[in-house]
Amino acid sequence: MIVGRVVANVVSTEKHRHYVGHKLLMVQPLDAYGQPKGRALLAVDGVQAGIGDRVLVVDEGGSARSVIGDEGAVTIRTAICGIIDRIDIEEQHE
Amino acid sequence: MKLGKIVGRVVSTKKLPCYDGLTLLLVQPLDQYKKEAGPVLVAFDTVKAGEGDLVFFESGKEAAQANPNGWFNPGDAAIIGIVDAVNAEEAP
């Protein structure tokens, strides 16, 4: 799973039938200390997340389909599966 | 999935039969501020997108599954939707 922050809400009308009825959010992956790392990706929302939330993202088809509860939606690969309250981690040493 | 913009079209006559009737488009991946993010790639279209359109595309096995000619076909990027709006936080 990826830790990320929701940075945008994406609106689409014309889309593949598997995506109909699902909210799309753009997530910026973060490192363990909360710094942006890598390129932003889009994910189907499974937990009613919103812009600014720190979230958990699965980037694997079977898991994503199970998050949204539609095993037939075989073209969906990325989904938000949790909202993070807190991460406890050791202090960063240079 | 990633956000992208259609920047061109690829025309190919001699290709695998599984691509028959599909449009191959050049996609420039973008970040949330619609700035370029990574190299341009070729994706097949499932939503009748055209040049200049803002789209989202899927990659990997799930993209191949979107091929209307059948799911057990090669393909690693598919255009899945046309984007109407991106409501992002303000750029830093």
Image (cartoon, coloured by chain):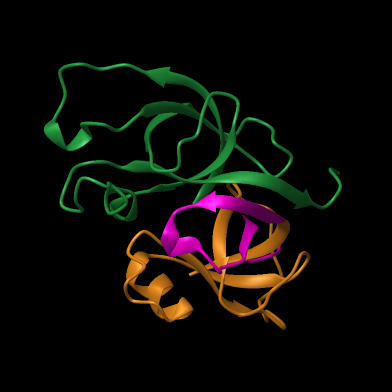
Q: Quadrant of the C terminus of chain B?
A: top right
- Residue B60 location in percent, x, y? 33, 49
The percent coordinates of residue A84 (x first, y second) are 67, 79
**Where does residue B58 sit, x and y in percent of width and height?**
42, 49
Residue A16 among magenta residues: yes
Residue A88 picture quarter: bottom right
Q: Is residue A29 visible?
A: no
Position of residue A33 relative to residue A69, above or below, is above
For chain B, what colour was chosen? green
Residue at the spot 42% in from the left edge and 71% down from the top edge: A64
A47 in relation to A39, above or below? below
Q: Is residue A39 visible?
A: yes
**For this view, does B60 lie left or right of residue A7?**
left
Q: Foreground: B9 or B40?
A: B9
- The residue positioned 56% from the left and 40% from the top of the image is B55
In the displayed structure, does residue B90 sit left or right of residue A60?
right
Q: Residue at x 30, y 33 (%)?
A: B22
Answer with the quarter of the image where residue A3 lies.
bottom right
**Eyeballing the image, is A64 above or below B43?**
below
Foreground pick, B59 / B52: B52
Q: In the picture, residue A51 is in which quadrant?
A: bottom right
Range of magenta residues: A9-34
The color chain A is rendered in: orange
